[in-house]
Image (cartoon, rainbow, N blue to C red):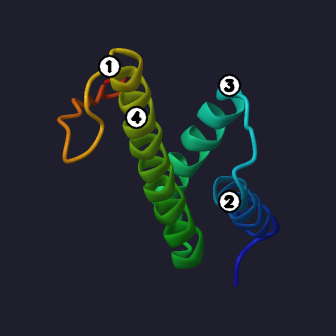
Amino acid sequence: MMDADSVETLKSIRLWMRAIHEGWTVPSVTMRLCIDKATEELSSPFPSVKKAAMDYLLECSKASMSALEKMDKMERLDAGKPTDGPQKVEVVFIDKPHAH
């Protein structure tokens, strides 16, 4: 059985997921805190919390890719370049340094 903190964490992650699905505006500082908390919860002993955290992080990645694609399309429109067909989008992942 989950403890009270884990239940609250699960509720929070579900709310964060709803924010993505509903397209709510979330300040970048808040989004970063949510992502950090979800990342921490990947090591939760409770499978439901761990799965919710993984699902949330996946949705964040999808939302980021969608935003990059839209931004790329707008930049091409502004430059008078074609926007149809597959376009090359460069994605750079920066790992958070770990303290050893």
Instruction: Give the residue pinned by disc 3.
Output: 29
- Please say if the residues under marks 2 and 4 sit with CB atoms less than 8 Å apart: no
Compute the Cα span from label 2 to label 4. Answer: 24 Å
Instruction: Give the residue pinned by disc 4.
Output: 68
Q: Answer with mark 3 or mark 2, whichever residue precedes in sequence.
A: 2
Where is residue 42? Give x, y as percent.
47, 58
Could you tell me which secondary element the residue under label 3 belongs to? helix
Inspect this view and state whether residue 18 appears: yes
Residue most extreme to the bottom = 1
Q: Quadrant of residue 71?
A: top left
Q: Answer with mark 2 or mark 4, whichever residue precedes in sequence.
A: 2
Q: Quadrant of residue 87?
A: top left
Instruction: Give the residue pinned by disc 2.
Output: 13
Where is residue 50? Give x, y as percent.
51, 67
Compute the Cα span from label 1 to label 4. Answer: 18 Å
- Check disc 1 and give the amino acid type: Gly
59 or 49, which is in the foreground?
Answer: 59
19 or 76, which is in the foreground?
Answer: 76
- Check disc 3 and give the amino acid type: Val
Q: Quadrant of residue 82?
A: top left
- Determine the residue positioned at 40% across, 34% down: 68
Q: Answer with mark 3 or mark 1, whichever residue precedes in sequence.
A: 3
Is disc 4 surrounded by few (<14), some (14 to 19) or many (20+) residues within 10 Å?
some
Could you tell me which secondary element the residue under label 2 belongs to? helix
Instruction: Give the residue pinned by disc 1.
Output: 80
Is disc 2 surrounded by few (<14), some (14 to 19) or many (20+) residues within 10 Å?
many
- Determine the residue positioned at 31% across, 24% down: 100
Q: Answer with mark 2 or mark 1, whichever residue precedes in sequence.
A: 2
The vertical placement of 43 against 70, above or below, is below
Residue most extreme to the top = 79
Q: Nearer the viewer, mark 3 or mark 4?
A: 4
Image-based side of 14 in relation to 71, left or right:
right
